Amino acid sequence: MLFLSRLAGGLAHEIKNPLSTMAINLALLEEEWARSAGEPTPREQRSLRRVKTLQREVQRLENIVNQFLHYARGGEINRRPTDLAAVVRDLLEFVEPEDTAQGIRHHVDISAGLPLVMLDETAIKQAVINLFVNARQAMPGGGELLVRLRREGNWAELSVTDTGIGMTQEQLEHCFDEYYSSKKGGMGLGLSMSRRIVELHGGTISVISEQGRGTSFSLFLPLIVELTSTPRDGRMEDDA
């Protein structure tokens, strides 16, 4: 597809080069602190810890970019039987501190005993984290994040709903388009990337939104059972 090559080229120049510059400068800072004579002071220890934290985050971002470039260029995903409920819980635990600081309260409903899903865990985590970040950005003054995971026929349905500002009709129609963003400084890749990853897993993603009331994304992934249903208009329908 044409958009895949555009994504690959844009990411290579807009993200990877600045990240490499950051990594080099952080390594130089770490060397400077390591050369300090004598026992490091508490201030130096705090600074070194912060440098190491930044290095880990830069590495994480580089891994995300490399993974996405791999998918965008048509690379295979490495799927294996995975507990989607555990993945969602891990991600919620990861975003909760920042959400809490912004006045966002979590409401979680995860059905027990869901079958496993064939997932590339790294990829699907990025797809879902993009939805969580999108929800946070839609609620700058705080709000409610509702996350529900349940079984619908032979599919797992993950819904991510916020009580934020909602989307206009134009935003709703183009939110999954690459390089489309209504946010200042946004690259417009997050939701496009999420859709691409979900589709590579044989799933679907849909969205409904109302200005002033919020937005809800629904993500469907096939469970490891014999498929007897297909997603239709955001719902599952069993074959007769």
Image (spheres, rainbow, N blue to C red):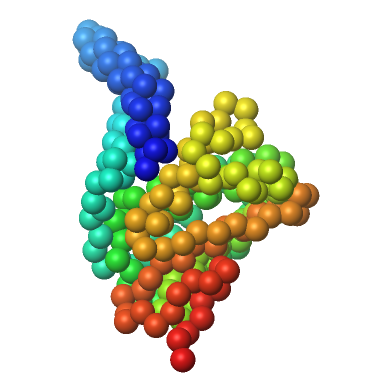
Residue 19: image quadrant is top left
Q: Residue furthest right?
A: 212
Residue 178 x, y percent position in the rendering: 49, 38
> Who's the residue at 32% across and 80% down the image?
225
> Who's the residue at 28% across and 45% down the image?
74
Q: Looking at the picture, does residue 240 appear above or below residue 233? A: below
> Who's the residue at 35% across and 34% down the image?
5
Residue 90: image quadrant is bottom left
Q: Looking at the picture, does residue 158 appear above or below residue 212? A: below
Q: In the displayed structure, does residue 191 sit left or right of residue 18?
A: right
Q: In the displayed structure, does residue 164 sit left or right of residue 205?
A: right
Residue 94 x, y percent position in the rendering: 45, 49
Residue 47 x, y percent position in the rendering: 38, 20
**Is residue 142 in sight in this rendering?**
no
Q: Quadrant of the N terminus?
A: top left
Q: Residue furthest bottom?
A: 240
Residue 227 x, y percent position in the rendering: 36, 79
Q: In the displayed structure, does residue 67 sit left or right of residue 2?
A: left
**Is residue 101 in sight in this rendering?**
yes
> Who's the residue at 62% across and 33% down the image?
183
Q: Looking at the picture, does residue 141 appear above or below residue 29? A: below
Residue 202: image quadrant is bottom left
